[in-house]
Image (cartoon, rainbow, N blue to C red):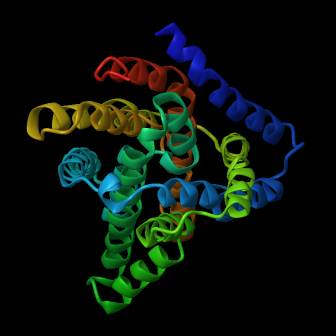
Amino acid sequence: MADVFLQTLPFFLIIGLGFGAGRTGFFTETATAWLTKFVFYFALSAMLFKFSANLSFTDVFDITFVAAYLWATGFVYGLVLMAAFLRGTSIEEASFEAQCGVIGNVGFLGVPMLTLLMGEAAIGPVMLVLSIDLIVFGSLIVILVTGSRDGTVGAGILRTVGLGLLKNPMIVSITLGLLWSASGVTIPGVMNDFLDLLGGAATPGALFAIGASLATKRAEHPMVAGWLSLSKLGLHPLFAAFACFVLFPVDPYSAAVMIAAASLPVAGNVYILAEHYGVAPQRVSASILISTAFAVITVSLVIGWVSGLYVP
């Protein structure tokens, strides 16, 4: 377990470096926003495109895996929704709390970290988790919030959801990569070197950007944020394991990757949506801050546990 902690520590040290740069003002909010945009639209997209271009659709898509992850995530989503409703919160706030309880930082943290720690074979399951989070639950939050405000779910909401997915560079890069793979054309040497160089900036850039963005967040609403962090770091991987080993016969390696991905801290894009809709941004912000702080320990524990579930 100590070895796994030491392997994950460099990732969190870069996050800490970004946090320090943000807190001291050396890296401003504007600088953080531009770095995040560079990573999101260019570096991470290059990494995801190259990964998916070397996979086939059958390498990525596994219906049993999808069913297990949907069940686990949907179950925890429902638990957090129910807890929020029992406290008397609105459907808008409850939906954002549920989002915090299940949507992890798979894109910026999970893709680089899990592929390095668990091997390149992890990229298929990780991309599947990322795709489900973006397509299913990313759409669900928009439908719940907009539908609760409008009182109905109309064509306008569905159009907004569809355009949002088409504009998401992670979805676009994975799709284009799979299409390239299906074409059977080998990536030219110069293009491969270009993708390696640009994609290589994704890991340090994303981790630094996570830390710098955390510097502006405050631990307000600590009780609720603590519960949401517990849900994300503890309940989500726990029920993912239950789904994989009890309800669905998921391959041990893929199950291990899913559980590790489910253990990641709350994603920063949940805060962006909360700010956009003006729904509980401080609560979401605190959940991101607290879950990321505790993830230094909990993610190492989970990865250390799941590494014994399969033969490397």
Residue 157's spot in the image, x, y percent?
36, 84
Q: Quadrant of the C terminus?
A: top left
Residue 215's spot in the image, x, y percent?
72, 41
Compared to residue 309, the image places residue 165 above or below, namely below
Q: How many marks?
A: 0
Residue 269's spot in the image, x, y percent?
54, 57
Res 224 seen here: no
Residue found at the far left of this picture? 247
Residue 115 falls left or right of residue 94 = right
Residue found at the far right of this picture? 26
Compared to residue 251, the image places residue 205 above or below, namely below
Residue 157 falls left or right of residue 197 = left
Of residue 47 and residue 219, the one placed in the foreground of this image is 47
The part of the image, by quadrant, that contains residue 133 is bottom left
- Going 64% across and 30% down the picture, which residue do you hit? 11
Residue 153 falls left or right of residue 55 = left
Compared to residue 188, the image places residue 207 above or below, namely above
The part of the image, by quadrant, that contains residue 276 is bottom right
- Going 36% across and 44% down the picture, which residue do you hit? 101
Of residue 200 and residue 77, the one placed in the foreground of this image is 200
Residue 16 falls left or right of residue 247 = right
Residue 124's spot in the image, x, y percent?
39, 49
Of residue 156 and residue 50, the one placed in the foreground of this image is 50
Compared to residue 134, the image places residue 234 above or below, namely above
Of residue 78 and residue 279, the one placed in the foreground of this image is 78
Residue found at the far top of this picture? 2
- Going 86% across and 37% down the picture, which residue do you hit? 24
Residue found at the far bottom of this picture? 155
- Going 55% across and 61% down the picture, which residue do you hit? 49
Res 198 seen here: yes
